[in-house]
Amino acid sequence: MDTVDSERHRIELTGYCYRMLGSGFEAEDAVQETFVRAWRTYDPAKGPLRPWLFHLATNVCLDMLRGTQRRARAMDLVPDAIPGADLGAPLPPDRWIQPIPDGRALDPADVSVAKETIRLAFVAALQHLPPRQRAVLILRDVLKWSAAETAGLLDTTITSVNSTLQRARAKLPATGEADAEVDESLLARYVSAFERYDVDTLVSLLHEDATSSMPPFTWWLRGREHIRAVLLAAGPDAHCAGSRLLPTRANGCPAFGQYVKGEPFALVVLDVAGGLITGETTYLDPGLFPYFGLPMSLGQALRTEK
């Protein structure tokens, strides 16, 4: 197996491992380990490379998932907060579903894999499934492998694959709808209102049941009016007052790097449905910026634009 062959499969393998593990960094580690094992064991005489890579990647992910706590979103852990409630203590990074750049997990040439299967809500829902059920559901329903192909990959029978898939589908929590394409004017209004701290306009762009969360804190809000109350209470001294947003993409969704006083502050990932923002996940982790190709200072971004 040569490097060209392996790199051709990197994006789809990373997307697969990300759905299994809920972390982009762990997914890339899993893919790297998959390639190491493939270089040692692949024999072209035994069949095509792609199924062998997925077989190895599945085993790597199952090994990584042994004994670990499932990753989650705030809404999977605690009830929504009342405005004015304390943020509480932060949880460690390995408790959270982490974002991933679109370009690392979604191949634009592969239109068979829908963007919603990489959304934070869907990846979080997958974590409710036992790892082997998770693998079967991703292979069959997301990547569209046949029952026979999946059985061969997992060293099991077609009957076992079909029954496992049925159980997985029954257990998978609902994740809601998302717009396939997001109106750019909606995003422009959001950025303008965010940077001016225009609470009325910001709130007008939200669905009435919109959610807002801020990993690593379990504190989260549900509902346009609760979000409005928190924004108004924070006032002009809030972190987003006077901040700047630079666009990127995460989990098949629009996202922004938020800069405060020119320095990286948070990665904001939006869910959009019905022409309104239904979810806002604000990752308070500037360490994500290089991963998303975002500059580590706003001055650097401005120099690049020139």
Image (spheres, rainbow, N blue to C red):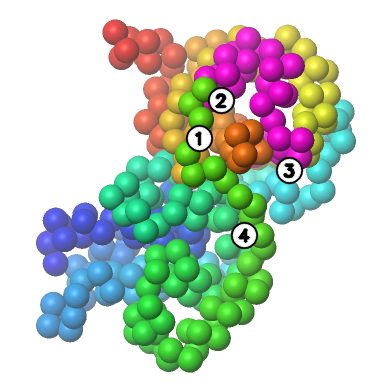
Q: Tell me whether the residue at label 1 lies in contact with that at label 2, contact meaning CB atoms closer than 8 angstroms.
A: yes
Q: Tell me whether the residue at label 2 lies in contact with that at label 4, contact meaning CB atoms closer than 8 angstroms.
A: no
Residue 125 badge: 4
Q: How far is disc 4 from disc 3 in space, using C-alphas?
A: 17 Å
Any part of residue 283 in sight: no
Q: How far is disc 3 from disc 2 in space, using C-alphas?
A: 28 Å
Picture quarter with the N terminus? bottom left
Tell me where residue 145 sits by quadrant. bottom left
Which residue type carries mark 1? Val
Which residue type carries mark 4? Ala
Which residue shows up at 67% across the image and 13% down it?
Answer: 197
Q: Nearer the viewer, mark 3 or mark 2?
A: 2
Residue 218 badge: 3
Compared to residue 293, the image places residue 231 above or below, namely above
Picture quarter with the C terminus? top left
Which residue shows up at 21% across the image and 71% down it?
Answer: 49
147 horizontally vs 117: left or right = left
For label 1, the residue is 182
Which is more toward the observer, 190 or 50? 190
122 horizontally vs 143: left or right = right
Compared to residue 74, the image places residue 236 above or below, namely above
Which is more toward the observer, 83 or 40? 83
Callout 4: SS: helix
Residue 291 badge: none
Q: How far is disc 1 from disc 3 in space, using C-alphas?
A: 28 Å
The crowd level at tag 3 (other Cα within 10 Å; few <14, some 14-19, many 20+) is: many
Residue 186 badge: 2
- Of the two numbered discs 4 and 3 on the same chain, state the one appearing first in sequence: 4
